[in-house]
Image: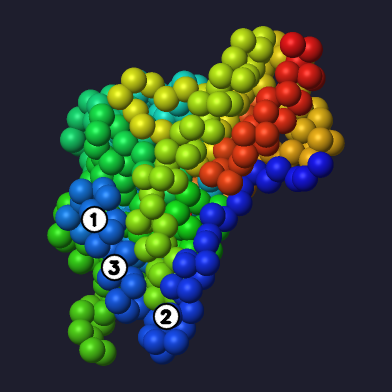
Amino acid sequence: MSEIRVSAPDLDEADIAAVGAVLRSGMLAAGPMVAELEAALCDTTGAAHAVAVSSGTSALHCAMNALAVAPGTEIVSTPFTFVGTVNPALMCGARLRFVDIDLDGFGPDLDQLHEAITDRTAAVVVVDLYGQPVAADGVAAAVGGRVPVVEDACQALGAAHRDRPAGNLFDVGCFSFYATKNVMSGEGGALVTDDAEIAASARRFRQHGMTGPYEYAELGYNYRMTDVLAALAVRQMARLETITRARQSKAATLNAGLAGLPGLVLPAAPDGVSHAWHQYVVRVTDDFACDRDTLAKHLAANDIRSAVYYPKSLPAYPHVAAATDGPTAFPNSERAAREVLALPVHPKLSAEDLERVVTVIRDIAGG
Ligand SMILES: Cc1ncc(COP(=O)(O)O)c(C=O)c1O
């Protein structure tokens, strides 16, 4: 029985050759491939500007800096996400204010979001968790234009909300090209925006605040992406639709195969949403035949890997709790952290792999 991995890089010989070509060119730092990647991101998202950087975290840091997230300000976000969503605000010296998630889709509770914005709020950060864009209309209504909205679309490249591409649903969008992402370069990231000032700020911030040769207008970092890595991402951007369709088809197979099992809540893309299925995440509730960790062990015993994204609500981490204003207990986030389990959904899965996943889960559920 071969192992079914929870994620697998989807690289072909031509991708590897593209990296070889960059190595032979002698242009290893930022160069033509980075510019190509930025053009492809503008093309895909419809955003006017794209700034490629070294990671999703650095893209979010550029966004926070551009929006004057600083000591004395707060960002409003959700606690059920990767810690990289909020660490950039902390790097800027800001405080955090969380609102709970809505268990359908893991976006922010819109009433709480509306209430949480105050005159200290510098920005709202929403997360397109698992590749599902947040309810953009609801978020826009709750925020009401009072503060800018940053979209953490690190998991959602290729997704869309009412035909509007993820990453370009709000003022700034951030992507990650980390090794497990739908488009990946090992490490890497990018910010997209229609706002020329935000883009210019990000371009300075990724390069020591540089405005010209040895001209430094402000503090910045070295957040540049390399051409070696951009070459990989460019190749995958060209087949993004194929990648997304493959994931959508695997998710549909899992949804059909796992339907009707008591206590197993399956993920569903709401009407008008094209889900990128970065992760296929079920919720194993108390009504299921066993608890989440027992199911994960049963899958592992059958050589099927699964994963928990994420095992804790963020205020469980001391550095986050210390920087959090307002509530720190969030029932829906804590419940999600107990119940979620990501099953394999990557494009390399065969029909037999998916059948095995379904059979093993049906077996433990007794149906
Ligand atoms: C939701 C979310 N936010 C932020 C990040 C940070 O991206 P990176 O790991 O590229 O820094 C990631 C990816 O790991 C993510 O999934």
Is there CB contact under 8 Å for labels 1 and 2?
no
Q: Does the rendering let one see residue 220? A: no
* CA–CA distance in space, label 1 to label 3: 10 Å
State yes or no: discs 1 and 3 in contact (Cβ < 8 Å). no
Q: Amino acid at mark 1?
A: Cys
Dot 1, crowdedness within 10 Å: few (<14), some or many (≥20)? some
Task: Give the labeled residue for mark 1.
Answer: 42
Of the residues under marks 1 and 2, which one precedes in the sequence?
Answer: 2
1 vs 2, front mark: 2
Seen from the viewer's position, the closer of residues 210 and 159 is 159
Above or below residue 300? Residue 259 is above
Separation of residues labelled 1 and 2 (CA atoms): 22 Å
The local secondary structure at tag 3 comes to: helix
- Mark 2 is surrounded, within 10 Å at the Cα level, by few (under 14), some (14 to 19) or many (20 or more) other residues, namely many
Q: Percent from the top left, x then y, of residue 130? A: 49, 38
Which of 243 and 39 lies nearest the eye of the viewer? Answer: 243
Q: How many marks?
A: 3
Report the residue marked by disc 3.
36
Q: Residue at x 25, y 41 (%)?
A: 170
**Residue 330 disc label:** none
Residue at the (23%, 89%) spot, across then down: 213
Q: Is residue 5 above or below residue 19?
A: above
